[in-house]
Image (tube, rainbow, N blue to C red):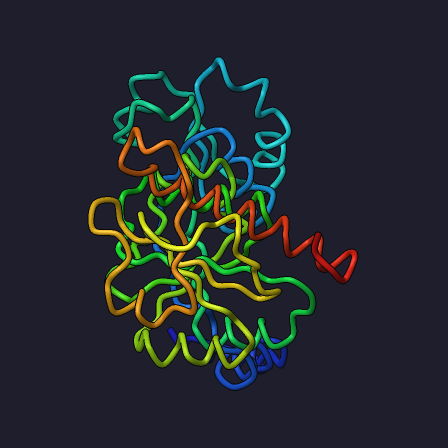
Amino acid sequence: MNQRPKKKLAPNPYTQVRARNKSHDRAPERPTAREIKYYGTAACLEIWKRRPADVIRIYITEERVKQFGPMLKWAAANRKAYHVVEDLDLEKLTEATHHQGVCVLAHEKESVSVVQLKNALKNTKGPVSIAYLDGVENPHNLGAIVRTCAHFGVRYVVGERGRLPAMSPSACRVAEGGAEHVDLVAVSNRDKDLQQLRDLGFAIVATAATGDSLYRHRFAERTLVVMGAEGSGVSRSLSQNADVVLAIPGSGDVESLNVSVAFGVVLSECRRQQMELSSTGKRR
């Protein structure tokens, strides 16, 4: 029995156009970001608000469902899976006891390069402060510093590559949503990059247990505040490269403040002076 030859289908022009666009016309895609299990009320809500496209899946306890109602409604509408779980399940999932009843699996926040930082600063007008961390690696201290930065409108935390840790889920929880408003920038050539920031008008202010009084210093409109790790402090080479070394006057009953607390005190005074100078054109 003879079979009739199959009819040859005409090529689909739409498919051809899609294929052509895919191979030639599409912009380069962002490399696949790591998937991170973030936890904590403020951290998870801010991730959803600031970069919802990065959210993959949500885990939540029954007690938190009402509080996260808008997020869960959004997840259902956008085909994002969410699971109501027990507290113990969430503890195992996050490997943390302070998860606050919620976990968001999301892509890691896109990093900012030194070039992007410098270009942004060139186009920024008015008072600007930057933090530089010299060996501060404790996630709670890092999270607290980032939270302080977000409060005072400091958008960048700089540090030497290999010594500036990434924002872990624990640090993001401590930052209370501040991690979504602050970018960490790792530099490869510390002295060269700091000099380029100085060329952009930044005064470099280091901190130490002994130095000029914080409250007698006149902060520049553009200031980079250097904080060192507890115990070792700011490295000698960085202190020598700074325009001034400042200390926070105290009673002397304790040797020093926690690094995140010290940073908050210094940054608060710096921003107070900068805002006063910006609004009046002079300081008191």
| Farthest-out residue, right | 280
Query: Based on the displayed image, in which of its 4 quarters is residue 59 positioned?
Result: top left
Between residue 51 and residue 62, name the one nearer to us.
51
Q: Is residue 101 above or below residue 76?
A: above
209 vs 116, left or right, is: left
| Farthest-out residue, left | 232
Identify the residue at image location x=50%, y=43%: 148
Q: Is residue 136 above or below residue 28?
A: above
* Place of residue 176 in the rendered image (x, y in percent of width and height, measured from the top left): 49, 35
274 vs 149, left or right, is: right
Between residue 255 and residue 134, name the one nearer to us.
255
Query: Based on the displayed image, in which of its 4 quarters is residue 160 positioned?
Result: bottom left
* Place of residue 204 in the rendered image (x, y in percent of width and height, measured from the top left): 44, 67
| Residue 160 visible somewhere in the drawing | yes
270 vs 213, left or right, is: right
Between residue 143 and residue 8, name the one nearer to us.
143
Query: Based on the displayed image, in which of its 4 quarters is residue 257 positioned?
Result: top left
| Residue 184 visible somewhere in the drawing | no
* Place of residue 208 in the rendered image (x, y in percent of width and height, measured from the top left): 33, 52
